[in-house]
Image: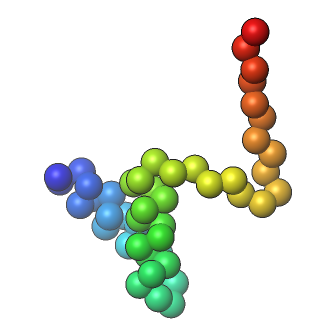
Amino acid sequence: MESTNTKLRVIHRRAFGFRTPEAMIAIAMLTLGGLCPPLPGRHVSTHESS
């Protein structure tokens, strides 16, 4: 639990310039939730094994 609280404090510091609480919640969910959405301008390489 303490590591999650520490991570949330760091995320809160990074999100200081955002204007809405929803933006901070979104960053927390992306950081701690394990989601990896495709980002614009970045190509995802897929390795197919035969």
Position of 10 relative to 12 (above/below) = above
Position of 43 relative to 26 (above/below) = above
Q: Is residue 29 left or right of residue 42?
A: left
Camera sees residue 13: no
Marker count (numbered)? 0
The residue lying at 47 percent from left, 70 percent from top is 26
Task: Name the residue furthest front.
Answer: 50
The residue lying at 37 percent from left, 64 percent from top is 10
x then y, percent, for residue 12: 38, 72
Position of 25 relative to 49 (above/below) = below
x then y, percent, for residue 28: 41, 64
Q: Is residue 19 left or right of residue 10?
A: right
Q: Quadrant of the C terminus?
A: top right
Position of 50 relative to 30 (above/below) = above
The residue lying at 78 percent from left, 60 percent from top is 40
x then y, percent, for residue 3: 24, 51
The answer to which of 13 and 33 lies nearer the viewer is: 33
Task: Name the residue furthest bottom.
Answer: 19
The residue lying at 75 percent from left, 24 percent from top is 47
x then y, percent, for residue 8: 32, 64
Q: Is residue 18 left or right of residue 6?
A: right
